[in-house]
Amino acid sequence: MKTGELIDGIERFVLDVVGTIVPGTILIIGWAMLFGIPSLPGIGRFMPLPQEMDIWLFVVLGYILGHVVTSVGAVLINPGPIVRFMRKHPVSARLVAVFRSDSEVATDLTTKQTYQSFVQRASAVMPWLGSIGVNQVHDWRSIAMSLLSPQENHTVYRFMFISLLNLGTASAVIMLGIAWIFAKGATQARSWRPWSSLLFPECRDIDWSVVAVGIVTCLILFERHSAFYSRALRVPFTMGIVKLVDNPAILPATSVSHGRSIYLAGGTRSNWQETVTAALSDWRIVDPRVHHLEDERAYTTWDLEGIKGCDWMLAYLEESNPGGYNLAFEIGYAKALGKKVILVDTKSAKDEAIRRYTGMLHASADVKANRLEDALEFLDGLPTRG
């Protein structure tokens, strides 16, 4: 794994954790401020914890409650019958405009010119994407994201993080408000007093000015969630259009090759493809590394189209290849299409145990070479078809 990829993974992990813990922490601290710390019997007797573990227990509890809060938020922004009724009237519609579900934001995006332009252009450049429906926003977004650089992906990911953080924070505030009103009634109800003394030991009197401020804050946070979620969906398509215009390598070349076109199948760690490109200067070479796609369906489709447009496949099973499963699949696909396959296997040559599981690969090869140099010498000597 490259250093940049490791840093990217760590950053995403931290954002995920922080984005979940913060709403959970708000719920915990808010509960303690409004109701005091619940005194559940038996906890101290059966689960004695050293003082230094308190912070870890707090973090874990915040993480768990954060997931609960985020799930509640997803329900809250999904417009119910009351919101749908209020939308029919101009005045009340403004009050509930912030309540837009993620699916509504995605549906609205399909009407935008940027989204439609990306789908049309991507379908023209990569015809095999035609099977994806126009309304499948998240599938198209994955394709657009796969075209972007890591730095551009970071920007989009931060938009999504801010969106979810706003949603979680607003949901925590709403849950506290509802609990506050319920707690006040529960402490006054005789049947609830035993439970209310445990869950709400120090329930404060309701301050309606605080409730009003909380409602306004939640409306603002919900609006920010909707705005940043919409931006996180929209930006990849804007950037993707530029990539489609500027990067002709997104589509495998299909020019006339006179029998001298070859697809390079194998690992990418040692950059052996550069050696092949330099040695076979008069060949049309399809190198899967050039597309920089990250979405599995997108790069698989690209690779298969690349194999389909070539006369030969050079399959290189290196010692550093962890399994060779993708290589085996590509060889099978090439043989099914009637392509010629030259296999260079340096992995099983030094390990008899591996050799027993690569028999079909060797049997499928039209030409086998012990070294990459031998394969290149053979290919360079092939005549050109007229």
Image: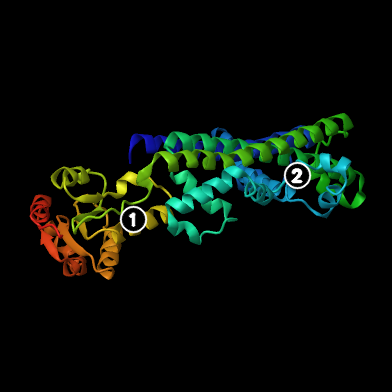
Q: Distance between the residues labelled 1 and 2?
A: 42 Å
Q: What quarter of the picture does the C terminus occupy? A: bottom left
**Left or right position of 91 against 160:** right
Instruction: Give residue 56's quadrant in the image.
Output: top right
The amino acid at mark 1 is Asp
The amino acid at mark 2 is Phe
State the residue at coordinates (53%, 43%): 237
Residue 352 visible in the snapshot = yes
Q: Counting residues from the N terminus, which is met first, the one under dot 1 or under dot 2?
A: 2
Q: Where is residue 263 in the image (x, y as percent from the top left)?
A: 25, 55
User: Would you place residue 198 above or below residue 336 in this image?
Assistant: above
**Left or right position of 377 against 260:** left
Q: Residues within 10 Å of mark 2 (few under 14, many from 20)?
A: many
Q: Nearer the viewer, residue 261 or 375?
A: 261
Residue at mark 2: 99
Q: Which of 375 and 12 is in front in this view?
A: 375
| Disc 1 versus disc 2: nearer the observer | 1
Q: Position of residue 283 (x, y in %)?
A: 18, 50
What's the image's color scheme? rainbow
Residue 303 is marked as 1
**Left or right position of 55 against 85:** left
State the residue at coordinates (63%, 43%): 66
Q: Where is residue 133 in the image (x, y as percent from the top left)?
A: 55, 59
Q: Nearer the viewer, residue 27 or 172?
A: 172
Q: Where is residue 23 in the image (x, y as percent from the top left)?
A: 66, 38
Instruction: Give residue 98's quadrant in the image.
Output: top right
